Amino acid sequence: MAKRQRSAVSCHGSGFSNVALPALSLSKGRATRDLAPLVRGLALMLGLIGCAGGQAAPPKEFNGQQALGYVSAQLAFGPRIPNTPPHEAMLRWLDSMSRARADTVVLQRWKHRTLTGDSIALTNVIARFNVAATTRVLYLAHWDTRPRSNGNTKDTLAPVPGANDGGSGVAVLLGVMDALKKQRPAVGVDILFVDGEDYGLFVNDNHDVLLGSKYYAANPVAGRPDFAVLFDMVGDRNLQLKVEDNSEIAAADVVDLVWGTAEKMGFGSTFVRSTQGAVTDDHVPLISAGMRAVDLIDFTYPAWHTKDDTIDKVSAESLGIVGNVAVGVIRKVK
């Protein structure tokens, strides 16, 4: 799941301070200059910046306990490693769960050749709500798990169960879809489950990681969203979500929207307005493609990339906080 970067820029402030930067990739890829996302972003910001002001808090629609059950269901498949039966079984389940909730579902299938010459079959699952809407929000999380441990562990041959790293983000997005099925969104919402995020190592130009988000960035099903939010490692029992630097620079107004919504809902102790440095994660390919994207991630997780990333490290309370904010953000967009 992600790799921490040394931050080249320390930048944290109001949503108006950095609005000229959303089309600039800070981490990799070529910078792009496209005024369309800037203009749309400014319009969206002007309509939403009041979320930190006098608007009432959105209702709490998300069931954290049910989301914890979604984590358990994923773990029951075993490690979801590409080219394995558990990965294929998880894909069938995720496709079925999405079709039971969304208006339409799109599968993106492709094969990736690894640095070692292996061919792995990968699939992104995109669940779409209110397809005809022009204002669109993109939420994403990775559904694969890491083949080998490389975190704080000596057992480097063990696969990672992925309760938090992978499982929590998927569970939040499934819970968001439950809420959107009960009460349809006023805007378009695309839920993207990306594959192949954690297959290889974050070396050699990240050739074998972030595969699903790279593919989607090059082949967007719904065009360029007004903004995107990535959910990665968001179920930790000791959850604290600080502002990731690439997110603040690429989409400061979206950071204000998300953290402001959390504060309105009473979750200011979990969504903390301080920076945690830059992280290479699935939002980076989207930013490189000119999308305004932010990353919700708690990198202070001792079980990261180890066999100890199990369900006892995840809580329904943390999932409920993140899920309620996720739904609340959608309800604020008009």
Image (cartoon, rainbow, N blue to C red):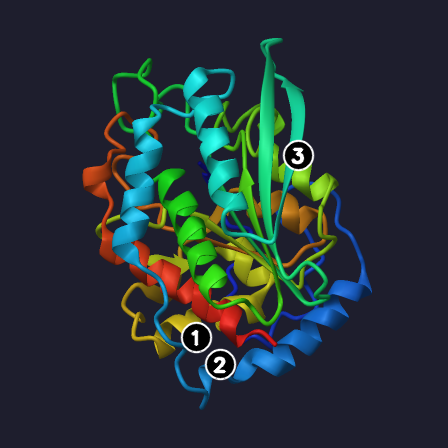
Quick one: label 1 or label 2, which is nearer the N terminus? 2
Do the numbered discs 1 and 2 sit on residues whose CB atoms are within 8 Å?
A: yes
Considering the image in quadrants, where does the C terminus appear?
bottom right
- Disc 3 designates what residue? 108
232 to 37, vertically: above or below: above
Residue 205: x, y in percent?
62, 28
Instruction: Return the residue at label 1.
Output: 260
Q: Could you say which is closer to the camera, residue 247 or residue 8?
A: 247
Q: Which of marks 3 and 1 is nearer the N terminus?
A: 3
Q: Pick whichever, 276 or 180, lies toward us.
A: 180
Closer to viewer: mark 2 or mark 3: 3
Disc 1: CA contacts within 10 A as few (<14), some (14-19) or many (>=20): many
Is disc 3 surrounded by few (<14), some (14 to 19) or many (20+) residues within 10 Å? some
Q: Residues under labels 2 and 3: Cα distance?
A: 35 Å
Q: Distance between the residues labelled 1 and 2?
A: 6 Å
Q: What amino acid does circle 2 point to?
A: Cys
Q: Residue at x 61, y 39 (%)?
A: 213
* Position of residue 66 measured from the top left corner of the image (x, y, whole percent): 29, 51
Disc 2 crowd, CA 10 A, few/some/many (<14, 14-19, 20+): many
- Residue at the left extreme of this rendering: 312
Residue sitting farthest toward the top: 117
At horizontal 52% and vertical 37% (from top left) the residue drawn is 95
Percent from the top left, x then y, of residue 54? 45, 91
> In the rendered image, which quarter is residue 36 located in?
bottom right
Q: Can residue 5 be seen in this view?
A: no
CB atoms of marks 3 and 1 within 8 Å: no
Residue beneath disc 2 = 51
